[in-house]
């Protein structure tokens, strides 16, 4: 009975948004690994009326029409990178730039997902709040670092064009991680793939969990919380429009007092005093 009661308490705690959202984010990150993170679409005169998509995964794998794009890239001496530790599903050129970190690409996603599970199971409110703060900071640092490394590698590959390529005299360039670019007569556009969007959604959930770190609102309260937040935003926008209109109508030098502050959404919140509060499930912060 004691064990079943303990499990029931844990299950009840996991319905809190500040605990449930990190778990959902963890699931999204693990799913993102299996999907393309990044998508590049190329157009060239050699393929009139046709776009060539290439999809890149978190591990050394390409999708889409990468074989055609590989032939097109060799025209200007631009090669897919060499992941070093794992064999990719494409032929690696002998002059390709070594990118060993691609082989361990899924590990950051797994680490952040595991941290989300660990934080959600924190035994006290105080440890939960600390965990949410550390995880959000760490997650942003990890993915910002990955973004910077990818951009550096793109710069490196774009400035390591093969001088023996069929098309000579092409200057080095830096393809952006996100956005359009051109090299010779080839145009490209890079953007998120499905896995990238899932990663952004996971980070967004971690931000929301951090903002709700002092709240005991549960999954059942989520619709009302969203409605209250939208209503609060609508009132803020309306107040801003009213203040702008009133300011335009009043003579210069007239002071216009702001409207009264609207009510905050009614969500249950834990005691934030220095004393140790007792949570709903009997936990002490």
Image (tube, helix red, strand yellow):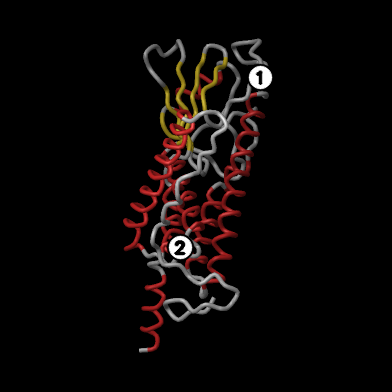
Instruction: Say what secondary structure mark 1 lies in.
Output: loop
28 lies above or below 65:
below
Circle 2 sits on which residue?
18
Residue 219 on image: x %, y %: 35, 62
In the displayed structure, does residue 242 sit left or right of residue 256?
Answer: left
Residue 136, given in percent of the width and then of the height, sits at 56, 55
Residue 196 placement (x, y as % from top left): 46, 41
Whole-angstrom CA distance, mark 1 to mark 2, is 47 Å
Question: Residue 87: horizontal and vertical position, in percent?
Answer: 54, 41
State which mark lies toward you, 1 or 2: 2
Residue located at (60% from left, 37% from top): 150
Q: Residues within 10 Å of mark 1 (few under 14, many from 20)?
A: some
Q: Nearer the viewer, residue 167 or 275?
A: 275
Picture residue at 41% right of the left edge, 14% below the top:
47
Query: Which of the two residues, 237 or 189, is positioned nearer the viewer here?
Result: 237
Vertical relation: 150 (above or below) 67:
below
| Residue pointed to by mark 1 | 172
Label 2, residues with CA under 10 Å away: few <14, some 14-19, many ≥20: many
């Amino acid at each position: 009975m004691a064990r079943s009661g303990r499990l029931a308490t844990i299950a009840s705690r996991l319905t809190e948004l500040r605990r449930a959202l990190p778990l959902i984010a963890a699931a999204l990150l693990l799913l993102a690994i299996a999907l393309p993170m990044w998508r590049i679409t190329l157009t060239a005169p050699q393929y009139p009326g046709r776009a060539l998509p290439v999809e890149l995964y978190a591990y050394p794998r390409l999708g889409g029409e990468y074989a055609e794009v590989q032939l097109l890239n060799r025209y200007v001496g631009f090669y897919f990178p060499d992941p070093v530790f794992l064999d990719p599903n494409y032929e690696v050129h002998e002059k390709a730039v070594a990118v060993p970190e691609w082989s361990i690409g899924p590990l950051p996603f797994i680490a952040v997902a595991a941290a989300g599970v660990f934080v959600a199971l924190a035994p006290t409110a105080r440890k939960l709040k600390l965990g949410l703060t550390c995880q959000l900071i760490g997650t942003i640092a990890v993915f910002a670092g990955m973004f910077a490394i990818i951009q550096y590698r793109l710069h490196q590959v774009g400035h390591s064009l093969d001088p023996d390529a069929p098309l000579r005299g092409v200057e080095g360039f830096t393809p952006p991680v996100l956005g359009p670019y051109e090299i010779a007569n080839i145009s490209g556009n890079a953007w998120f793939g499905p896995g990238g969007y899932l990663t952004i959604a996971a980070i967004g959930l971690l931000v929301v969990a951090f903002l709700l770190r002092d709240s005991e609102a549960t999954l059942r309260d989520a619709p009302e919380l969203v409605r209250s937040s939208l209503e609060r935003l609508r009132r803020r926008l309306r107040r801003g429009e009213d203040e702008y209109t009133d300011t335009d109508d009043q003579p210069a030098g007239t002071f216009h007092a702001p409207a009264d502050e609207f009510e905050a959404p009614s969500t249950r919140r834990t005691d934030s005093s220095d004393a140790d509060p007792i949570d709903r499930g009997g936990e002490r912060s």
